[in-house]
Amino acid sequence: MKKEYGFILIAYIIMQLSSYIGVPLVLLIGTAMGKSTVEMQSLSIPYWLVISFVTTLIIVLYLLRDEMKSGNELRNAAPVPTSITWAILGVFLALFAQNIAARIEMALGIEMGSENTAQIIHLIEAFPIVILISSVIGPILEEIVFRKIIFGTLHKRLGFVLSALISSVIFALAHFEPEHVILYSAMGFTFAYLYVKTKRILVPIIAHVAMNTMVVLVQSVFREDLERLIKEAEQIQSFIGGYFL
């Protein structure tokens, strides 16, 4: 593994653990500047999310600057039109894999719904800037760490299935919801397939960003409209059912 990749992994791990120090620090600084403790308690988490994720992204891009300039990895990459097609198709593949995984979890008696997603949606509703983290910066970092570095390193020594499985399980566990390891692993496996198929990390990044954005829009921005449509559909179904009884 390249030393730059090792530094990226360290930076990512520090980012994941930094909230234990960063959030209290933002709370302390905010109150010292005259903000109320109650106000800063609600602001400290989204503020630190933005600070830590943006800082880590800058560090990661800096560490990859030479690799991006050289373009060596793109020599065997799929053509741009093919890559665009796979990026679009990848969104639907990820949704399909997620649906299959969700059905498996239901069959195993695992309760549906992600606590992480619910918390993120709550933060976005209160502080819309968090959508930049959940839908753009987060997926970029995850694809670089889990697909480019971890999967890419394993794939040089192991076959696709084993390397994709290992990196996907690590990806799942990194979300700190072990009960949904199947769900997250299915998504990770799909993104690994997109990466190895096109040899462009940008392809799973685009698919991941698009998928996360869709989830956020459905569960926050369009949630009321969706609930209204569901209620109207239920009313129509009840009416039709009553008509034929």
Image (spheres, rainbow, N blue to C red):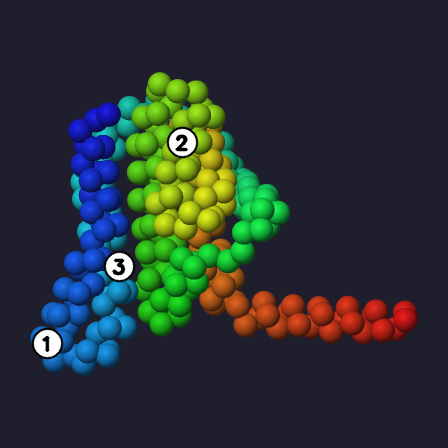
Q: Which residue is mark 3?
A: 49
Disc 2 residue type (three-letter) = Ile
Quadrant position of the N terminus in the picture = top left
Q: Position of residue 144 (x, y in %)?
A: 32, 38
Marks 3 and 2, how far apart at CA: 27 Å
**Rendered residue at 49%/55% (across/down):** 214
Q: Secondary structure at mark 2?
A: helix
Q: Which residue is mark 1?
A: 33
Q: Which residue is mark 2?
A: 166
**Label whose residue precedes the other's in the sequence (1 or 3):** 1
Marks 2 and 1, how far apart at CA: 46 Å
> Relative to residue 75, is residue 53 drawn left or right?
left
Residue 6 bears which disc, if any? none
Q: Position of residue 220 (x, y in %)?
A: 47, 66
Label 1 Cα crowd, 10 Å radius (few <14 / some 14-19 / many 20+): few
**Label whose residue precedes the other's in the sequence (2 or 1):** 1
Disc 1 residue type (three-letter) = Met
Task: Kindly indicate the quadrant of the structure image that contains residue 8.
Answer: top left
Label 3 Cα crowd, 10 Å radius (few <14 / some 14-19 / many 20+): many
- Identify whether 103 is placed above or below 157: below
Disc 3 residue type (three-letter) = Leu
**Rendered residue at 18%/81% (across/down):** 36
- Identify whether 62 is placed above or below 69: below
